[in-house]
Amino acid sequence: MDTKQDNKVTMLQTVLLFLAGAGKKLADIVRIGKGRDALEGLVGKIVQAGKAQNKPTTGVTLTREEVKADAAKKGEVLRLLAVTLTEDDTLRAELKTPVSKMEQGKDDDYVKYLQAIAAAVGTLDAEALEESGYDKKVLAGLNTDLAALTGTAGAARQIQLGTTAATDELPALFGQVDVLLEKTLDPLVKAQKLSLAEEVAGYEKARRIIHTAARKRARFAGTVAPGAVVLVYDRRTAGVPDPTLGNRSGRGRALRFYTADSPTARPTAGQGVLVKHKTDLHLESYARLGPDAEAPYLLAVLEGIDGEGRYVVQ
């Protein structure tokens, strides 16, 4: 992706984080919540297409059959949640067949069944889903698999994600995002100005695109005192979707990086990742840094011998 597209993705991720945190009252409104889920799916596809741009055009990722098998695992997890949590007897009956049985049938029927499962998740109660251990990444992964399956044909055909295909796909995805924001989310949120003024103001702030210079990388550096918790940055404004965690401390001083809902929270036992002195660790997401994937604050603490630690994150 170019710099303009990167900046827009950062804005979209900020909006999603806001609606999952401080703006949750907005997301609890049914139509806004559905819009947020749709936006999350599109952002997932954009991120995947962006990563595909860095792969060689001739590189083959997975065969169609492998993608079908991967989709089956995710689809079955979501199907079980749907038939358990739904109050719609008709929907429960429509999804009564295990995905493994549909996988062996006609391709079109299999894909339609997975699409029905994905759609069913959006009809379920958000609180019930959360209490049942629902992971949004499973639905995002299934939608990615479905996009691959609907874009290819033939059991033996190989699915390729090359630079050209990904570059061609991105404008269409960003176009879908614009329509979703401008025609659905933006007006629905603005309609809540009287009842949720603070949340609407926060949404509007999150919607602003922060422009960065081409090839310029955000960089955060500082020191960590023994026993202290250091706030590295707020993910909602930092513009760093895939951080590289660096430790510039002396020998024997390791830094533990983690995420939390509070800028002063200490890590729980085993939480986060430990980065040894004079090393860097690149992460494609924040998933390894805490149990809550949406936690906004990146924090660091010093482990090892006494003395001061130094971090660099970019």
Image (cartoon, grey):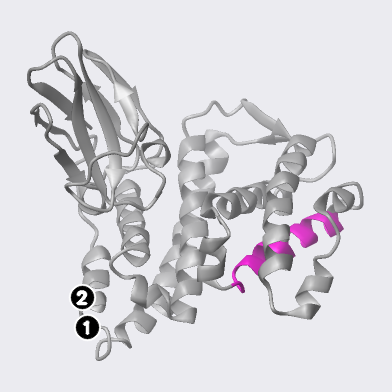
Give, as a three-letter code, the residue at label 1: Ala
Q: Residue at 32% across / 51% down in the picture?
A: 295
258 up-or-down from 19: above or below: above
Is 272 magenta? The answer is no
Residue that label 2 marks: 201
Q: Residue at 53% across / 42% down in the picture?
A: 166
Label 1: state its secondary structure.
helix
Give, as a three-letter code, the residue at label 2: Ala
As drawn, the label of residue 45 is none
Q: Give the magenta part as a residue range.
A: 108-124
Seen from this angle, which residue lies furthest front?
269
Nearest the eye: 225 or 1: 225
Magenta stretch, main secondary structure, is helix
- Coordinates of residue 292 in the picture (x, y in percent): 40, 50
Whether label 1 touches label 2, CB < 8 Å: yes
Residue that label 1 marks: 197
